[in-house]
Image: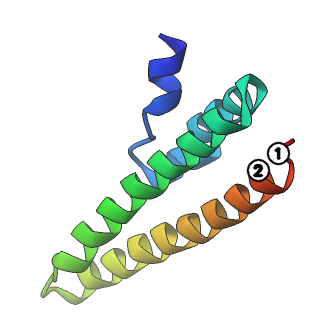
Amino acid sequence: MLEAWLDEPVTSPRDLRTAFLAKLYLAQRRAPSVALRLVAGQRQALRDRQARLHEAAPAEPFLALVQRLRLAQVDAALAALDDVQALLQENMP
């Protein structure tokens, strides 16, 4: 059950601060490859979310602003995952 949980990306960028970090902690303690697999899965989930946000084009100005904020959060999360991946790879035996 733990392996399945570690392989499942979080669904919301706000969950990166809690659930994802808990998963990352446990994954890196199991093996660097498990942590890297988690990061790759999370990156793909965020890219999918990013694509959906790009496809949506709200006409109402406030909704467009909300969409831009959400997209900025996803972009920032993807950049952070790049850093996490680099750190994991640097610390691999």
Q: Is residue 46 left or right of residue 81?
A: left
Element assignment for label 1:
loop
Mark whose residue sits in front, 1 or 2: 1
Query: Residue 22's x, y, as percent?
Result: 66, 31
Q: Amino acid at mark 2?
A: Leu
Residue behind mark 1:
92
Query: Residue 55's x, y, as percent?
Result: 17, 77
Element assignment for label 2:
helix
Residue at image point 62% right, 31% down: 23
Q: Cα distance, mark 1 to mark 2?
A: 6 Å
Residue at image point 56% right, 64% down: 77
Residue behind mark 2:
88
Q: Is residue 19 left or right of residue 11?
A: right
Colour scheme employed for the rendering of this structure:
rainbow
Q: Identify whether 54 is placed above or below 38.
A: below
Q: Amino acid at mark 1?
A: Met
Which residue sits furthest top? 1
| Foreground of the two, 66 or 79 | 79
| Foreground of the two, 93 or 13 | 93
Q: Identify whether 92 is placed above or below 43.
A: above
Which residue sits furthest front? 93
* Badge 1 vs badge 2, beta-carbon distance below 8 Å: yes
How many numbered marks appear? Answer: 2
In what quadrant of the picture does the C terminus appear? Answer: top right
Q: Residues within 10 Å of mark 1 (few under 14, many from 20)?
A: few
Q: Which mark is residue 16?
A: none
Query: Residue 17's x, y, as percent?
Result: 63, 46
Residue at image point 45% right, 41% down: 10
